[in-house]
Amino acid sequence: NHFECDDLGNMTEYIGCKIERSNTSRAIKITQPVLVQSLKDEFDLPDGVPPTTPAKPGTTITKQPEEEPLNAEKHTNYRAGIGKLQHLVRNSRPDIGNAVRELSRQLVRPTNSHYQAMLTTMKYVVSTPNRGIVLNPTGTWNGKDKDFVWIIKGRCDSNYATNPDDRKSVSGTQVFLNDSPIMAKSSTQKVITLSVTEAELYAATSCAQDMLFVYRLMRTLDMKVQLPMILECDNKGTIDLSRNWSVGGRTRHVDVRLYMLRDLNEDKIIQMKWVKGEQNSADLGTKNLDHASHAKHTKTLCGDNDENF
């Protein structure tokens, strides 16, 4: 059976996202220019030199109980602004993921400090309107070759107990398909971890789950995937635990997550690999970095420049 369909050519737009194809390479860039413009039109962004990072480096946006909460109108505007920023993070701007995650935690009782921090993030976005996720996979696939082998790679990082409001750690995870970013997350861990290694373990487990999802999706489509998949981490303690079946008193409480990573390692499905901290782009989702580090890791996800293709 066949379905009638029309050939509309290359995709140029999808649910508010602009799809651009490079004239010199096979790269595709996804941006959201209409949504970025709406930030400029609907919010009174501060004047002056645009910020070079989405949030002040080295800081954490926390509750401000000593400040007065926003009035009802401004509170509504704050929630609307965060919604727009979340939509950007989800589709095209992973470089603002950590700042938006921190701002999103203040939806119940935002203050003027939080509102100004949101405007700073918006101004950063507006100052880089052409930035977006760049998909430029390695290898050449003709769309039909079932013998083509795909490579899934993950990166994980964490920021231990940095938030004084609840002391929960932050996970930053990224998944790549043939070196193209297909997942990038910044999330607050659901439990309070007791050490840096445990926080890294939770981040590694979360990333491994995302990698398994992509792997099973690819296999459902009858595509070959190279095994073992590599999960990069900058914490040697977590990597050692993923390979060691002996459990001591300091790690017994995280036994279940350890068994998952150990099983994946033993079955040669996912193997963890150490990478230097400054080379781990997942750091982008765990803290507010300085300009140099933020720009370096952003290039991994959004390419070398922000110019139009």
Image: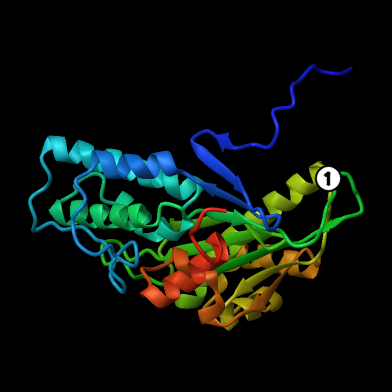
Quadrant of the rendered image containing residue 57 = bottom left
Give the structural element (helix, strand or loop) at label 1: loop
Q: In front here: 41 or 181? A: 41
Taking the image as shown, residue 92 lies to the left or right of residue 153, namely left
Could you tell me residue 10's position as x and y percent?
A: 68, 37
Quadrant of the rendered image containing residue 184 = bottom right
Instruction: Please tell me whether residue 255 is drawn above or below residue 243 in the rendered image.
Output: above
Could you tell me residue 63's position as x and y percent?
A: 21, 57
Q: Which residue occupies 64% across, 53% down?
A: 22
**Residue on which the image places disc 1:** 143
Taking the image as shown, residue 161 lies to the left or right of residue 157, namely left
Could you tell me residue 278's position as x and y percent?
A: 51, 80
**Residue 282 appears in the figure:** no
Q: In front here: 271 or 5? A: 5
Q: Which residue occupies 40% across, 66% down?
A: 169
Instruction: Please tell me whether residue 47 is drawn above or below residue 219 in the rendered image.
Output: below
Instruction: Specify few, some or many for label 1: CA neighbours under 10 Å numbering under 14, 14-19, or 20 or more.
Output: few
Could you tell me residue 114's position as x and y percent?
A: 21, 54
Instruction: Please tell me whether residue 262 is drawn above or below residue 152 in the rendered image.
Output: below
Instruction: Please tell me whether residue 102 is drawn above or below residue 195 in the rendered image.
Output: above
**Residue 96 appears in the figure:** yes
Q: Which residue occupies 74% across, 52% down?
A: 215
Q: Quadrant of the N terminus?
A: top right
